[in-house]
Amino acid sequence: MTKAVCPGSYDPITNGHLDVITRAAGLFDEVIVSVVNASVRKTPPIFDTEERIAFIEEATAHLGNVRVEAFDVLIVDFARRVGACAIVKGLRAISDFEYELEMANLNRRQAKDIESVYLMASPQYSFLSSSGVKELATFGGDIDGLVPEPVARRLKEELARPRT
């Protein structure tokens, strides 16, 4: 049985993330969407870990071989713990490639037995990022079709600013 992890902060999950997760589910027997709950990023997440997990579980409920789990260790350690042979991530642009190349090499140094697998973003999602969605939501932009509907609703509640 082949298992893969799809790590990320998923703050929030986007339709681009879901595209990669769905495609990974077709390649591996089991996919564990791994939600980091100890991020080293500069800004705190909008949604807590439990809410991010709930969004992902709802959006992937139709995929029988996908489950969601939080992690707070090196992704290679988490992958080993769940028995995964691969770390699956999406790539949108050259800037993603540069960052992911560095991470793949660091991960490989830690765990030669775990492969990094990259799926090219589908064209309709090649521009899509969680940070971009949050910025749109903050200023009242249209985020419908970029994230699952429950996520869009909650983002609008959390981030909508009154206009001056």
Image: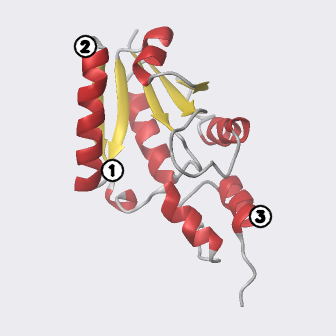
Name the amino acid, label 2: Lys
Label tally: 3
The circle drawn on residue 121 is 1
Tell me the quarter of the picture where residue 100 sits.
top left
2 and 1 marks in contact (CB < 8 Å): no
- On the question of residue 91 being in view, the answer is yes
User: In the image shown, does 149 or 77 lie closer to the viewer?
Assistant: 77
Q: Earlier in the sequence, mark 2 or mark 1?
A: 2
- Residue 93 position in % (x across, y down): 27, 55
Q: Residue at x 31, y 24 (%)?
A: 107
Crowd rating for badge 1 (residues with CA inside 10 Å; few <14, some 14–19, many 20+)? some
Cα separation, mark 3 vs mark 2, equals 44 Å
- Residue 80 position in % (x across, y down): 43, 10
Would you place residue 32 above or below residue 97 in this image? above
Crowd rating for badge 3 (residues with CA inside 10 Å; few <14, some 14–19, many 20+)? few
Q: Residue at x 59, y 37 (%)?
A: 60
Q: Earlier in the sequence, mark 3 or mark 1?
A: 1
Q: Residue at x 43, y 60 (%)?
A: 128
Q: Dot 1: what SS? A: loop
Q: Which residue is mark 3?
A: 157
Would you place residue 104 above or below residue 42 in this image? above
